[in-house]
Image (tube, rainbow, N blue to C red):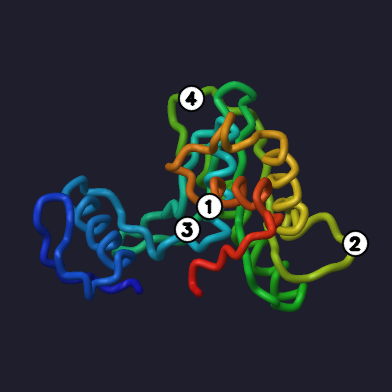
Amino acid sequence: MTGELKAPLETGFEHRDWSIPRQLLRRYRLQRFHRQSNTPIPLRMSNHLEQLTAEWLEYRGYFVRQSVLVGKREKGGFEGELDIVALNPVTRHLLHVECSLDADPWEKREHRFTAKFERGRRYVPSLFDGLDLPAEFDQVALLQMGGGERTTLGGGRLVWVADFISEIVEHLRRHRPDRSAIPSTLPLLRTLQLAAHFSSSRGRPGLISG
């Protein structure tokens, strides 16, 4: 949904019109924030794969930006959007990730990701003005669907969601939630931590839904 939302009924920090989905309320608040701070409104909300990727990078010590609008046009609008741009201030690893759930042919993917990564090469360095950045940075296409032996796409590295999730779960299995709980500000990652440690039944009925 990209249209301007009307203000829901709010009382203090909570809204009282429960017919309004929380996602729409969150988008309204984001629109209000961007109007007040005179910053561009993202074209869309990030999907779950982008959100999980951002949470993982933040957990690993990166400074993360999501759904970054770039290439402001004189007559309004922007050239495009970068899914995730992240910088590790310790290792100086600068990363641009484009996530996709599509099942498009490789030819169409190659064309689309070539344009995405070319846009990233033009605009990513300007997103961190004043910081000591590496001369080159890493670009990754994170795909859920597909197969084959290829390792690159559109000039960037190709990473499969299956390998990405496997890496996360393997790490989380070494960190018990009672000793090293993922912060509640990273809800998708915290859910995966619970699944990594509590996916086996204890032999008692546990269906909450009945």
Viewer-proximal residue, 78 or 17? 17
Please tell me which of labels 4 and 1 falls first in the chain: 4
What amino acid is at disc 4? Leu
Q: Which of pointers 2 and 3 lies earlier in the amino acid sequence?
A: 3
Q: Is residue 209 above or below residue 128?
A: below
- Tell me the kind of residue under disc 3: Glu
Which of the pair 70/162 is nearer the observer? 162
Q: Position of residue 130 (x, y in %)?
A: 44, 25
Instruction: Please report the residue visible at 51 percent of the width from the left and 46 percent of the height from the top.
Output: 123
Gap in angstroms between the C-alphas marked 2 and 3:
29 Å
Q: Is residue 129 above or below residue 9?
A: above
State the CA–CA distance, disc 4 to disc 1: 30 Å
Name which residue type carries label 1: Leu
The mark nearer the N terminus, 3 or 4, is 3
> Residue 55: where, in percent of width, then height?
53, 45
Q: Residues within 10 Å of mark 2 (few under 14, many from 20)?
A: few
- Residue 3 is drawn in which quadrant? bottom left
Residue on which disc 1 sits? 188
Secondary element type, mark 3: strand
Choose the circle earlier in sequence order: 1 or 2: 2
The amino acid pointed to by label 2 is: Glu
Secondary element at image label 1: helix
- Nearer the N terminus, badge 2 or badge 4? 4
Q: Which mark is residue 149?
A: 2
On the image, the x and y values in percent for residue 42 come to: 37, 59
Which residue occupies the foreground of this view, 192 or 2?
192
Q: For mark 4, what is the residue?
A: 131
- List the residue tagged with mark 3: 81
Residue 35: which disc? none
Q: Is residue 61 left or right of residue 153?
A: left
